[in-house]
Image: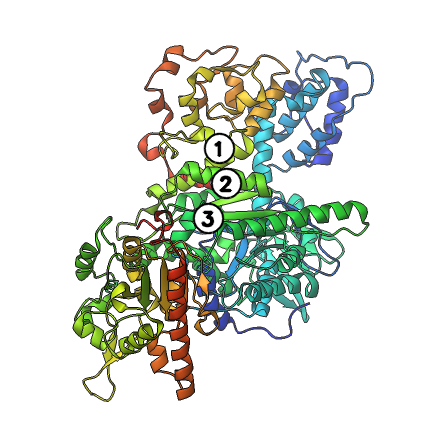
Amino acid sequence: MQQASTPNFQVLKEKLKILADAAKYDASCASSGSNRARAAGGMGNTEGMGICHSYTPDGRCVSLLKLLLTNHCIYDCKFCINRVSSDTPRAGFQPSEVVWLTLEFYRRNYIEGLFLSSGIAGSSDATMEKLIRVARDLRLKHRFGGYIHLKVVAGASQELIHEAGLWADRLSANIELPVQGDLDQLAPAKTIAAATQSMSQIDERSSEVREDNKKMRVQTKFAPAGQTTQMIVGATPSTDAAILGASEKLYQDHKLRRVYYSAYSPIPHADAVLPSEKPSLVRENRLYQADWLVRFYDFKAHELTTAEAPNLALDLDPKSAWALGHRAFFPVDINTADREALLRVPGFGVRNVDRLIEARRFRRLRVEDIRRLRVAWNRARFFVITADHNPDALLLDHDLLGNRLKPAAEQLSLFDLRQTAASGEL
Amino acid sequence: MIAADFKPDLEGWRQEARKFLEAGIEPSKILWSKESGSLSLFGSTDPDMKVLSAPGGRFQVPAEFLEWAQLISSAADADRWDLLYRILFRLKYERKDLLKFSVDPDIARAELLMKTLRRDIHKMHAFVRFKKTDVDGREHYVAWHKPEHPILKLGAPFFARRFGDRTWSIFTPDESAHWDLGEIKYGPGMPQHEFQAEDAFDGVWQTYYASIFNPARVKIKAMKAEMSPQYWSSMPETALIPELVRNAPARLQEMAKNQNRQAEPPAGASLTELRAAAQSCSACPIVHRAQNLVFGEGPESARLMIVGEQPGDREDQEGRPFVGPAGEVLDECLRAAGIDRADVYVTSAVKHFKWRESETGSKIRIHQKASGSEMHACKPWLEAEIARVKPALIVALGATAGTALLGRLPKVKEERGRLFESALAPAILLSWHPAAILRSFSEDERRERLEDLKMDLAQAQNFLSQNENPKAPDSCLPQS
Ligand code: SF4
Ligand code: SF4
């Protein structure tokens, strides 16, 4: 199954330097949500939860071989290093080189699979066809069962999207920015409508295939890990309310698995040596947390911001912020409250809540019981009643409660950020 | 006190535990492991031993508990057998749904332990690094990995599922696993210093690893939390970490230098103020060799805006757009289209002249095309002019102006003469740049392009006379 000739390592390294570097700004890295058994005589499988095979010193997970096929691009999206008006060094892979690299990386257990995107050199369809060729060769010629995430090139035709889904586990068409006005300023050749059209085509095709599969004996896979998208944050004045609203709509309309947020960093100034404390990164993290609340905690996007404060607080997680604004909702009795109410308690995660509901069938729960579930008790304690604890009603009404919930300034630690940014979980 | 006498693996424990359980011996009376406490001081029997009589009927261990036992038995923790028996005993004599009672100290401890073990197995799946070797002309892949707990047997089947088409071996200090295409065989372990395998491909992986690191986000603690240094010695990429971290500040500086700056026009300024502000622009290096700023020119009330590429030698000397040879061509075409240049706002995508010395030593300043980042740097001026003039139609001359206005590199030959929708203006029309006409290969081509430009400008004029809207509506303007 190996290719006859081994490409020159040195040449590949030079291309990797450019085309891996150029791909690293894409925030999506997950390799989860698919299930593919290894084909007879082939290599690779996917088993639900993806694996991070390494971590770079920026704290990010290395799960997929993330590459651009080429960083030549005729578009001029201002936020992108590959835009035509950029002096960045350019390079391009042959599809066969990407196939070879993927197989060699995978074989050594460096990666879960491939994430392939591309600058648009020439037409959208010509570019999309090349991405598809890589995926098709991996699946058909090499019987590769690892994870493949293909980017849907802006403006790619429906037929190509349909083919891409046959080979890829996941597809993603980038929305780039939350509203058309933002695109007009930064990426005038792109439209929300074109991106969402691609999303609809993916979604519709995947329903069709699902329906067909019910009738057929031979099952077809179409992007079994669904679709995602990416939004750049901080490059335009759009508020978090607008961003979260746009995301919520995308989740509803196109059944997206995930919206990725990527903090835009315009110019790293000389003072950028401690970038992890940059407000843009904190904001990115807050958006992930808020997004998580919408998807798993039954929050509506509009609940998380207000007309007066259309942006999420930077110094407080969005659930605590909501709780502070809705104190009459609390305290919640953990021995009687329903799941929805428990999910709104700051410091309680979905798993905590489900275990707590199981456990309270055994007996009335006390503080020590909850602490054993490893909830963030220092936050939760102001909001819950247990068999042996009633929060200080005065404190719940007190203005200073906000300060008690805020991590001390430096506690907005890298660790917190990294943890929640990776999962979005609070 | 009874000292358990069993082979310390799951099967051994099971047999022993079954005996104790049937006899109803309480967990506190059994010593499962010498390390697990000072209980051994009490000797092997306890006179106070309380034997509970087993409840009637057969006791069925929940299937879930067997899964737990399998995991927990692989833990390195000395109290694992004791914990398992305690839970087993309580399942029988207390509640058979005990496992769901997560807040119980035994259950919480078991869950924590299982979490640790699952994580250890997961990290093995993640961090094993195979090296390609040649065994009698056959590919064979080998790896050395040190898990925290002795979980090799739990972790190895994953590799058979994934890499079942090639033979491989995984060595740990205590045990090894060998896939022969049919089954996994287990053998003795190997210390790391005895494991010797080289793979030239590691270098390609390292290159990849170094290239995806973003020096603008250094988070060592976060990295170590997920990829503990205890694993590093068998992962080739980790050798680069110190250097990557050390060089991050320098690389950031470098990025800052290369990152494309942009001009910053004052917000809400009038055309005159914009021009004045642009006089002191130094957002890109072209300015240092130019004599004059060449800002746009024409009435603020203009309905037509024409955007060229960048000024030439004459423009630089006079500080006015389209006054050189290209300007003559433009004027000729405007006249032919019946457009009075005095009604038009004429400008260019880049506002300073870029040139180099002639190789022949003559005084002639050779025109040079602005680079991508220079165009990018200058673009805010053009946007500010558009926001001020609010033209009903913009004619982009050439690919550079086209790129600045359309957001992508257009093909002039194929796309000229078309009206594009845009947020910048109700319509954008693309045509040849006069300089491209002058540079034509042949006389035929020159004449053809000239006619094209005349035709396109006539179309522009036509559009303007049909379009009643005197100016662009405010809503579609960028507020830069
Ligand atoms: S199309 Fe994609 S690669 Fe090209 S400039 Fe826009 S964002 Fe960058
Ligand atoms: S060319 Fe444009 S960006 Fe560069 S210095 Fe001149 S006005 Fe500024």
As drawn, A281 above or below A379? below
Please determine if labels 1 and 2 lie on a single subunit.
Answer: yes
Query: Mark 3 against mark 2, which lies toward the viewer?
Result: 2
The x, y position of residue A344, in whole percent, is: 50, 24
Q: Secondary structure at mark 1?
A: helix
**Is there a contact, CB below 8 Å, between mark 3 and mark 1?**
no
- Sequence-earlier tag: 1 or 2: 2
Cβ of disc 2 within 8 Å of ligand 1? Answer: no
**Is there a contact, CB below 8 Å, between mark 1 and mark 2?**
yes
Amino acid on which disc 1 is placed: Ala
The x, y position of residue B92, in whole percent, is: 73, 19
- Judging by the rendered image, the residue that carries numbered circle 1 is A301
- Sequence-earlier tag: 3 or 2: 3
The x, y position of residue A91, in whole percent, is: 46, 69
Which residue occupies 17% across, 61% down?
B279
Q: Which mark is residue A60?
A: 3
Crowding near pointer 3: few (<14 within 10 Å), some, many (20+)?
many
Amino acid on which disc 3 is placed: Arg
What is the C-alpha distance between the residues marked 3 and 1? 27 Å
Q: A395 and B81: which one is in front? A: A395
Amino acid on which disc 2 is placed: Ser
- Judging by the rendered image, the residue that carries numbered circle 2 is A247
